Image (cartoon, grey):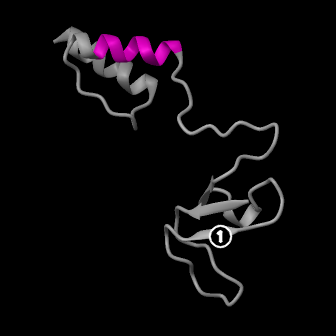
Amino acid sequence: MKAEITEKGVFNGEGKEMPIGETVEFKGDTLPAALVGKARLIGNKPKGEKMVVNPAKTKKRIGLEAQAAKLDVEINDDMTDDEIAAAIKAKKEG
């Protein structure tokens, strides 16, 4: 399998930090513990597994985003559902 380094803190066998964007190869179908949170799988997916790139939004999130758009409330993907709901409430209250 192959993985692309996405965060700092990954070191090679010589103890040198690997640059973000570097591709590494490893044996097995599971991302090694040292790469979890610091790399993403690329290339062929393991048999029987689905790679999730963009998880589906919940119905609640879709509804909140629709309400926010209708009221011209500015939101972003980093906001939680509760933060969006609070922004909508604040806009409605004036």
SS for dot 1: strand
Which quarter of the rendering shows the N terminus?
Answer: bottom right
Residue at the far left: name it.
94
Q: Amino acid at mark 1?
A: Val
- Depth order, front residue of 88/10: 10
- Depth order, front residue of 62/47: 47
Most prominent secondary structure in the magenta stretch?
helix
Q: Residue at x 21, y 9 (%)?
A: 93
Relative placement, left or right, of 79 versus 18 is left
Residue 58 location (% of width, % of height): 53, 18
Q: Residues within 10 Å of mark 1 (few under 14, many from 20)?
A: some
The magenta stretch spans which residues? 59-68
Q: Residue at x 25, y 17 (%)?
A: 90
Which quarter of the rendering shows the C terminus?
Answer: top left
- Depth order, front residue of 7/2: 2
Residue 37 in the image: above or below residue 89:
below
- Depth order, front residue of 93/16: 16
Residue 31 location (% of width, % of height): 74, 57
Residue 42 location (% of width, % of height): 62, 54
Relative placement, left or right, of 73 versus 53 is left
Which residue is the site of mark 1?
A: 24
As for residue 37 lying within the magenta part, the answer is: no
Residue 94 in the image: above or below residue 81:
above
Which of the 4 quarters of the picture holds residue 15? bottom right
Residue 64 in the image: above or below residue 7:
above
